[in-house]
Image (tube, helix red, strand yellow):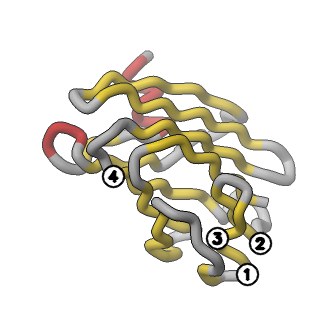
Amino acid sequence: MAAAATTTAGPGETSPAYETYRVKPQLGPLRSLDCTSHTIKGLVKVSIRRYDESFHLKLHSPEKTTATVIVPLKELAHSAIRVNNLTLWSQGKAIGSVPGVTVVGEADGSVSFEVSPGSWHFESK
């Protein structure tokens, strides 16, 4: 089950020792998922909730890591993405800023963000 949860929720190592990793939710018919991955850098915790009108992804990223978080847009008619209650993406473009978060861009019905260590709450609606 751990391998299935890791594949479904993300976190996937993209460089040695989890220095960089990716969280790319692939929930399929699931509405929620919680996943904790034990890495050499520490615990990566991901919590995902999908509602009729919104999508929530919470991430705890350990020290000395950089995560790429991919937030899906195509499942719902999302117009904005907020990170820790601040809008960073709206109507197809990056707006605003949050220290520790960089908007990478939009591709294939998703928006990618690069985040530093810490706790992050992504909300799309």
Instruction: Estimate the x, y position of residue 74 in percent, counting from the top left.
Output: 66, 64
Q: Nearer the viewer, mark 1 or mark 3?
A: 3
Judge whether 49 appears above or below 99 on screen: above
Contact? badges 2 and 1 (CB < 8 Å): yes
The crowd level at tag 3 (other Cα within 10 Å; few <14, some 14-19, many 20+) is many
Judge whether 24 appears above or below 78 on screen: above
Answer with left or right where residue 120 lies relative to residue 37.
Answer: right
Q: CA distance from mark 4 to mark 2?
A: 26 Å
The crowd level at tag 4 (other Cα within 10 Å; few <14, some 14-19, many 20+) is many
Query: Which amino acid, mark 1?
Result: Gln
N-terminal of the pair, mark 4 or mark 2, is 4
Q: Residue at x 67, y 33 (%)?
A: 30
Q: Quadrant of the C terminus?
A: bottom right
Contact? badges 4 and 3 (CB < 8 Å): no
In the rendered image, which quarter is residue 89 located in?
bottom right
Q: Provide the residue designation for mark 4.
A: 66
Q: CA distance from mark 1 to mark 3?
A: 10 Å
Judge whether 17 appears above or below 112 on screen: above
Determine which of the numbered discs, if any, sits on residue 79 in the image: 2
